[in-house]
Each structure stands twice: as structure tokens, then as C-alpha cells.
Image (cartoon, rainbow, N blue to C red):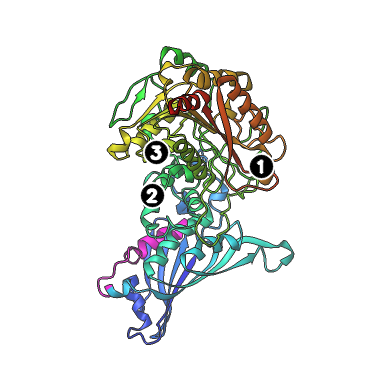
Amino acid sequence: MLVTISCTRPVGAEWPATDLGYLLHKNPSRRQTFEQSYGVAHVLYPEASDERCTAALLLEIDPVRLVRGKSKGTPDFSLGQYVNDRPYAASSLLSVAISTVFGTALHGRCAQRPELAGTALDLRIELPAVPCKGGPEYAERVFAPLGWTVAATPLPLDPAFPEWGESHYVRLELTGTLRLAEALTHLYVLLPVLDGSKHYWLDTAEIDKLLRFGEGWLTAHPEREWITRRYLTRRHTLVRTALARLAELDDQDPEELGALEHDYDDEGPDTETTVPHRGVDIAAPTTELADSRVAGEYTSASDAAVRPGMTGTAGQPAAETRSCNALVEGSGSIASGPGLEPGEPAGGDPAPQPVESGERAPSLAVLRRAAVHRALLAEGASRVLDLGCGQGALLLELAADRALTEIVGVDVSMRELKIAARRVRRLPEWQARRVTVRQGALTYTDASLRGFDAAVLMEVIEHVDATRLQALEQAVFGAAAPGAVVVTTPNSEFNVRYDGLGAGAFRHSDHRFEWTRAEFAAWAHRVGATHGYAVRFEPVGPEDAEVGASTQMAVFTRKNNDDDAAKGAA
């Protein structure tokens, strides 16, 4: 296993290229050896002149050391532990060697030449064999946004038998003008990412390492979610926590990245409790609502993702997943599990999405929340219900608006409500004190929900069984009877624009139905006529000339509000 780092002296520079040895803290005039737990690392300089200097890190792996202490009865014991590519292909073993042998340079320190540590150098990094199952384009996508010119050449399975085709290894050459510390952090993080595995046990400390060595570049990387998942070897709990922390660093909503910050205190059974804190309240369900929680007749989806290849109907659910690059589907209470990512072939590793120029377009979830917010302001609402609030994505956005004096989130899942409450507690005092979250099922009436200016059902109705939909209509439009109701739901006609989603296929496994624009309009007009509401429709997201927008929104306005206003004006 080998990596070489070459430095070329810039034109007019007064320092020789051999000063690379100062940065690496390794003398170019001699070879040095470092014992590792899995082998021996050698540092040598095959080239050392004033104009150009090359440092080589050669790692000799002892496969026996990698499995030492593992008995035959353990799942890790197999012939594959002894016969593998670890001695030859760059992997997490090389990353660990970089951190132990070049640790000072990795952290950007150089006592003797501090000014050189902060100088961008003309660097060339070569790795003869890098595992990259997605092909050369994967290496391009992860290294190019960091300022590298990437040359990734596929290696044949066997040069003697070209008809066998290419292997999943590439020869990787990176050239660019960067600080040496930046270059080493890129290698430290991205080599295990391309490999897709690690040779050691992962725990929460791995998240800290990712954020520490990714500081300054990971939050802005267009493939940061894919990098995070691969670096943490798809350990879903670790991935969600890492994405949540990345979102906080970037001042972004964690749900946009498919992130869920893990809370070990929430592992126990649901409890009926009240937890007041800075205006945030998880209220116990009333007697009317207690049975509905047990019956589980209302369920909503939490940030489910539209992904290529995903299909599902009421009788044939699709696998659930969250995805940073997919369109987020809701704000409710179905926990997501492992599944395919956008661009991932069945049975394969998730692929990063193509790098596009310019700023990232806002996700459908962001556009949806913005549309709902605008509709509430247009109705002049100040006291608002978020029915099926889930983890509180909409609550957080509404809390920042001083025009809204009271915001109540309702959801059937106590776990989701605890997460929402924790997120609200992090808000400034003036925002948090106006928000309450409480448990409830929308198919049961609740007297405490009456008298609000507006209610929101954002990506909720499609999760209700058709036989229970009328109960929801009565509970919301009849019993609660807010001044306005904003409803969003998927437009099934748009599904043909998603790979793998066609007629009869649903975007999420928990959807009981998905309506066309005509079906949604017919339902909305019937509900409005039954309960005394006028209704108007707005598309959410980019519109397609043939199939409309991905999300459809209806804004119901209670007619007696208009009548009362007209009488007052007269």
C-alpha cells in the first residue's frame, strides 16, 4: 500500500522543495520506519531536490495481525480475513497510518516553518491502487470540488486477460495548489469513503473525527451526505447524528439532509407526560385522544424520500429511507429505515449525485414549508395548529415569524414529539415560548383545538385510511373549525417524472392513496361545501406543463369569516 506526495517549488520561491520534510517532520536524507498494530510504515524520499521533492509512505500490512485475537467461533473469522486486498489497496489502514506518521502535518502544525504550513503548495499525490466500486467518476465527484485535478485510471482485473474487463480499483493522481494539511485531511476522510469500509469498530467518536478533519470543507461539499454515510459505513444511528451536526454547522434544517439526531433517552416506551421547558410543552393526551394513540389509526410519514426504483402500493409497501438529495415527503411519525439512495442500483452502494454548477436548489421540503408559511400569512393567521407536526420542521420555521403568536404542534407519536420539543428548546426564548407540542390523533375530536386562526395538514391526509378520512374531516373542519386550513399532498400525476415511479406506484410505503389534481380538487370542494369553506389551489415546486407540480396545496377559508367581515364593513 503506497501513497506519494510531491511538492514542486513555485517560480521565484526562496525556499527549496525539500522543505516538504519540515512540514512532514521527516528528514528527506534518511528512511524511517514506524511500527503499526497491523504492520510497518516506511517513510522515504525517492526524489529530493531544490526544485521537486517526493515523500512516499509505504505501508506493509500483516494480514495475520488484522485478525489476531479473533477466535474461529466469531463471525469475523474467515479465510477472507487472511486473503484480501488490504496489503495493496488504499483504505482506512492508510488513513490511520497518515494520522500516526504524519499527525503533526495533518493538524497543520510546523514549529520550524510555520509560514510554510499556511502556504498553498503545488502538490501531486499518487496512489497506485484505490478501491472505487462506482468507477473513476466517484473519485472525480469527491475530490474535484475540493480544488483537485483528478486523474482516475481504471485498473484491469488481469493485464494478461484484457477480455476480463476492468476491476473496481483505480490508479488515482491528484494535482492542485493546496496547503499540505488540507491535502492530508482530504485523504484521511475520503480514502475510507471510496473504499466503503473500515478495519476497526466504529462508535460516536468517529463522528467527532469526521467533523474535525472535515472542518472547512465538508459542510460545503456537494456530496457531503454521501461522504458522511460512507465514512460511517452506513451505520444509520451515527449517520443521522453526524448529518444533524453538519446541518447545525451550516445553519440548515437537519430534515433537509435526512438527519435525525439520536437521543438515547428516547429509547424507552412512550409515556404520557408533560415536560414544560422555556415555553415548550409536551402535553398529555385528553381522554378523547388516549384510545386513538393505542389504536394507531392515524400515522404520518417523517421525511420519507422519493428515490429512483422505489415502488409501493397499499398492498405492497416499498422500503423506507431518508435521503439528502431526494425530495422530502413529510413531517410526521414513521421512522425511516435502511434503503436505497438516489442513483443506487439494487444491491449496490449509494452513488453520489452529479456535481452541478451554482448554488444548490432548495429541496421540495423547503419549498413546501415556505408555501404553507405564505398561505398562513395571506390568511392573516396568528394562532396556528400544525396537525401531524412530526419532528417539528414546520414549527421551527413558523416560530421565527413574530406575526404568529401561538403555534401548537400535534402528532400521534410521543417519540417524534420529544424530538420536536428538544429542537424547539434550542430556539431563542422569544421563539420557544410561543410553541407547544402535544399528542393527539387527528381522527378524534379535541375541544382544546377549537378557536385557532388556521390549521396545517402538511403531507398528512395520504397516510390516513380511506375509511378514516371522513373522521379526520369531521375532527378538523367540523369540530376544530379553524378560520383557515392549509392542506398539501403529493400529486400522483407527477410520479412519472421520478425513475421507477409510474401509474399505481406510491412515493412512500405508508401512503394509503395518492391523488391526481382532479381527485384532490374534487375532495377539497366536497369538504369545503360540507363544512362551509371556500377553497383555492396552489402548486408547490417547479411545474411541469403536462403533469403539474410535485406537490399540490389547497387553502380552505371559512365562509362565515368573509360574511362577518362584510357585515362589519357595511
Q: Give amino acid for label 3.
A: Leu
The residue lying furthest to the bottom in this view is 12
Q: Secondary structure at mark 1?
A: helix
Mark 2 or 1: in front is 1
Residue 476 - label: none
The image shows residue 376 at horizontal and vertical percentages of 46, 35
**Residue stretch rendered in magenta on the structure:** 91-114
Which quadrant of the figure has residue 380?
Answer: top left
**Dot 2: element:** loop
Q: Tag 3 or tag 2, which sits nearer the N-term?
A: 2
Hey, what amino acid is under mark 1?
Phe
Indicate the quadrant where residue 171 lies. bottom right
Is there any visible trace of residue 202 in the rendered image? Answer: no
Q: Is residue 359 above or below residue 338?
A: below
Indicate which disc residue 396 carries: 3
Identify the mark at residue 494; answer none if there is no mark: 1
Rendered view: 566 above or below 426: above
In the image, 294 versus 534, the foreground residue is 534
Taking the spot 66% from the left edge, 28% from the top edge, the residue there is 522
